[in-house]
Structure formats: C-alpha cells, structure tokens
Image (tube, rainbow, N blue to C red):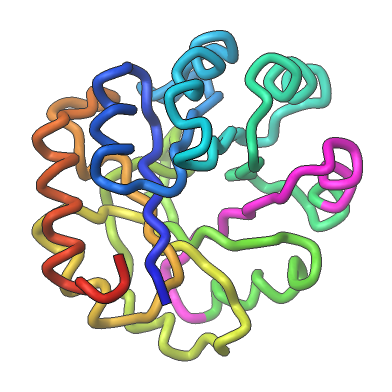
Amino acid sequence: MELDIKMCGLKTDEAVDAALAGGARYIGFIFFPKSPRNVVAETAARLRRAAEGKAQAVAVTVDADDEALEHIVKSMQPDMLQLHGKESPQRVRALKARYGLPVMKAIPVREAADLTAIDAYRGIADRFLLDAKPPAGAELPGGNGIPFDWSLLASLDGEVDYMLSGGLNAANIGQALSACQPRGIDVSSGVEGAPGEKDPELIRAFFQAVHAARPERV
C-alpha cells in the first residue's frame, strides 16, 4: 500500500513546488488567523493551481462558521476539507452534504482513551488525522511541533483510515513508521526554518527520510 504524504501549511510557490517535486499527494492550506501558516482563500486558490492533476488541495479550518467556509470553498475550490476543531459528527455530515467534498476530521491524541473519539465519526468522516493534543494554554490545535506516543495506534483496527501528524520530521519519521501503520502522514512545522516558513531543503530531506524508511510505500 502506498503512503499518502500531505504537506500542510503552505504559503509560497517555492514550498508548493518542493512538496510536489517530493511526491506529496495532498497539499494543505490553513485558514486560521492565529496560525503563522494562515493564508487567505485567494492566495490558496492561486497556489493550488500548480497542483492540479498532481495532488489534492486541502482546506484546513478550525470551527469555521458557514460564512467563512462558503468563501473558502467558493474561492479556493478545494478537493477536501480538513476540520481541525471541535466540529461535531452532525457538523461534519452537514458540510459533506452541502459541499459534496470528502472530509478529514482531526482527532487530538495524548493517551489511549483519546482514540475513542474516532467512534462517533465512523461512517461520516472520510478520513482521520491523528494529531498530538496541544499542550495546556496553546492557541493552535495543531502545528505545535510535538509528537505523541505512536505505539498507542497499534490498538486501532485496520478499518480506520488515518493520517499520522504531530511533530514529524526527517529525524523521527522512520521511528514513527516503525511504531504504527498509517495510510498517510502529515507534516508542517517539521519542515520549517521558522514558524510558518517552509524550507524547501527541509522538505526535500523529509521526503528522502520517508523513502529511506518505507521505499516500497512511497
């Protein structure tokens, strides 16, 4: 099975180009003003053009209201929505029906009990993104550069289609892929030289590390 790689929090042409050159199947654009990776829909719409026919463009939002989502979807025309807040299963179902787009629901993880949150979204969310639960007081629900205990995911049944996220980088991706069996991985802060600033060299190094760890799955 091939490993889907999502490069998230992109803001520049150089970062998009490096992600696509490495073989990213998903590129993510973040719409959350508190994030250093925040972009406006018009910028995402321009940047995603380079990915047409190569990668899926994902709009990442955090408890966005209807007006904000309408503007993002109309302007950017994403291939997928990623909901990274406290959106309920009912909200996920409603947005799928409204926009006809697949939805990836983020689940914050720190301990095994956190994985039970997946159950409420089974059959509703198309995919899950399992991310490290943010530390107390953090303003960002993701992109904090911290991992969690990947061995917790060994208890998941094979029907859970998830992307692994949270503190991944070139130095630890091999260990992460040895500890669990995700169908995809998501990286953001791990390929940045400064918060919100993607480094094309770090992006290339990350892809090389993934290939070294799982050459048959990339």
Coordinates of residue 175 in the picture (x, y in percent): 17, 74
Direction front: furthest residue: 53
Q: Position of residue 129 (x, y in %)?
A: 52, 58
Query: Looking at the image, can residue 133 be seen?
Result: yes
Left or right of residue 147: residue 116: right
Q: Residue drawn at (32%, 66%), measured in percent from left and top?
A: 148
The residue depicted at 52 percent of the width and 86 percent of the height is: 156
Q: Residue at x 32, y 37 (%)?
A: 20
Task: Quadrant for the N terminus, please.
Answer: bottom left
Residue range highlighted in magenta: 93-112
Query: Is residue 101 part of the magenta span, yes or no?
Result: yes
> Picture coordinates of residue 91 (x, y %)?
83, 47
Give the farthest residue toward the top: 42
Q: Horizontally, is 47 left or right of 158 in the view?
A: left
Q: Looking at the picture, how far across and down is residue 48, in whole percent?
A: 49, 24
In the image, residue 58 above or below residue 96: above
Q: Looking at the image, which is closer to me, 35 or 46?
A: 46
In depth, the one of 26 and 21 nearer the eye is 21
Q: Quadrant of residue 73?
A: top right
Q: Is residue 193 magenta?
A: no
Whether residue 132 appears in this view of the structure is no
Q: Residue at x 36, y 46 (%)?
A: 24
Quarter of the rendering containing residue 83? top right
Judged left or right of residue 68, residue 51 is left
Please tell me which residue lies in front, 111 or 128: 128
The quarter of the picture where residue 15 lies is top left
